[in-house]
């Protein structure tokens, strides 16, 4: 009994100092102009010098949701896994002669999302809107989290086209009892009269293929993917463009911890090459890297997501030079 009581007392005093530090930290942060959004929290900082949201050229925001997962859970850890995996990489990007340590990047943290998908989308939308109010010029980069969450930034940013890399068509009308399931996100976006083009596909139903044909949605199978096909299709799309990368577009060997991994996918450089052309040639108003998941820090999927994030930041920063 005595031992237990002692442990309890220790716990209480630890909690107290922890709270005190937290309070001091947030007061200091406010004093020095750090700008936390209403519904966000921070659980891990990236391995890069960061700036405040209002001063940034790029703002990162995590959407840690996995409530409609159909196979492997863990996408809620995606944003923190990606940030942690950045520790492994140099901030200098060889290919572009760009040092991300000199770029103006803000990390707005992760949105505290409710369990219900409809509610989660609402809170995510509100947060993206808040972000735009603080800094309308910065390029927002969202980290997920299930692909279902992509609907929130698309609703707010209102692009004319949606360019997506994905192993799946995501054109189902409903899945797992919900119209907002991750397997329906391209369909919901298409209903907003946004043009949809999908690359790296190797999974879908007959209904999804028919829906794509009837609605003029172009998609390229992973087996037929080429840079030329990508440029051909994306050149004709109206601007501005929202770019979404469902990490499962990559071969399952590169993303084994994603929610619904598929063998036979794209290589890392296939996607990087396409994005280099896209970032240079077309107007992109928002980007996401979704469906990163798993439970172990430094897992392969997180490394793939974090490396892609660094390349994206590097190429956009490189264009400005
Ligand atoms: N967009 C997605 N990630 N879709 C995945 C759909 C899962 C299909 N499971 C099929 C199971 C059949 N037994
Ligand atoms: Mn998807
Ligand atoms: Mn997918």
Image (tube, rainbow, N blue to C red):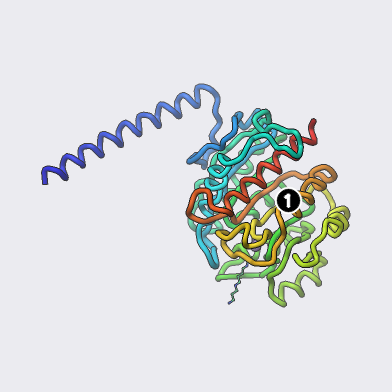
Asked whether 27 or 248 is in front, the reply is 248
The structure residue drawn at horizontal position 64% and vertical position 54%, both measured from the top left corner, is 150
The residue tagged with tag 1: helix, strand or loop?
strand
> For the view shown, which residue lies furthest in the bottom direction?
206
Q: Residue at x 52, y 64 (%)?
A: 72
Dividing the picture into quadrants, the one containing residue 135 is: top right
Left/right of residue 185 with respect to residue 16 in the rendered view? right
**Residue 239: x %, y % from top left:** 82, 48
Decide: is 125 above or below 192: above
Q: Position of residue 41 (x, y in %)?
A: 49, 40
Asked if residue 223 lies left or right of residue 184, the reply is right
Q: How many marks?
A: 1
> In the rendered image of this protein, does residue 24 appear above or below residue 40?
above
Q: Residue at x 59, y 33 (%)?
A: 48
Which image quarter holds the C terminus? top right
Report ligand 3 position as a quadrant. bottom right
Furthest-left residue in this view: 2
Q: Is residue 106 above or below residue 110?
A: above
Does the residue tagged 1 have its C-beta within 8 Å of any atom of ligand 2?
no
**Looking at the picture, does residue 23 appear above or below residue 132?**
above
Task: Categorize mark 1 by other alpha carbons within 10 Å: few (<14), some (14-19), many (20+).
Answer: many
Q: Which residue is mark 1?
A: 243
Among all residues in the image, which is located at the extreme front? Answer: 94
Image quarter for residue 53? top right
What is the x, y in percent for residue 193?
77, 58
Where is residue 19? Give x, y as percent.
35, 33
């Amino acid at each position: 009994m005595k031992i237990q009581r002692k442990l309890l007392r220790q716990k209480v005093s630890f909690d107290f100092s922890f709270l005190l530090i937290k309070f001091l930290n947030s007061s200091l942060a406010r004093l020095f102009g750090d700008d936390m959004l209403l519904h966000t929290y921070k659980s891990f900082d990236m391995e890069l010098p960061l700036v405040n949201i209002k001063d940034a050229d790029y703002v990162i925001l995590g959407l840690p949701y996995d409530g409609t997962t159909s196979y492997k859970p863990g996408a809620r850890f995606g944003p923190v896994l990606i940030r942690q995996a950045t520790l492994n990489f140099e901030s200098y990007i060889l290919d572009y002669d760009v040092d991300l340590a000199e770029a103006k990047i803000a990390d707005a943290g992760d949105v505290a999302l409710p369990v219900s998908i409809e509610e989660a989308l609402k809170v995510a939308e509100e947060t993206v809107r808040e972000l735009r109010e603080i800094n309308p010029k910065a390029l927002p980069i969202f980290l997920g989290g299930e692909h279902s969450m992509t609907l929130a930034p698309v609703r707010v940013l209102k692009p004319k086209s949606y360019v997506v890399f994905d192993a799946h068509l995501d054109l189902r009308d409903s899945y797992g009892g919900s119209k907002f399931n991750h397997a329906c996100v391209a369909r919901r976006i298409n209903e907003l009269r946004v043009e949809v083009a999908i690359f790296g596909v190797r999974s879908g139903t007959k209904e999804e293929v028919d829906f794509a044909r009837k609605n003029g949605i172009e998609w390229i199978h992973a087996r037929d993917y080429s840079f030329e096909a990508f440029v051909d299709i994306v050149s004709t799309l109206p601007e501005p463009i929202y770019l979404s990368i469902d990490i499962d577009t990559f071969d399952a060997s590169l993303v084994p911890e994603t929610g619904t991994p598929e063998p036979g996918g794209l290589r890392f450089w296939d996607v990087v090459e396409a994005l280099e052309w896209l970032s240079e040639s077309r107007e992109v108003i928002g980007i996401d890297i979704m469906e990163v998941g798993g439970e172990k820090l430094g897992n392969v999927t997180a490394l793939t997501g974090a490396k892609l994030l660094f390349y994206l930041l590097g190429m956009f920063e490189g264009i400005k030079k």
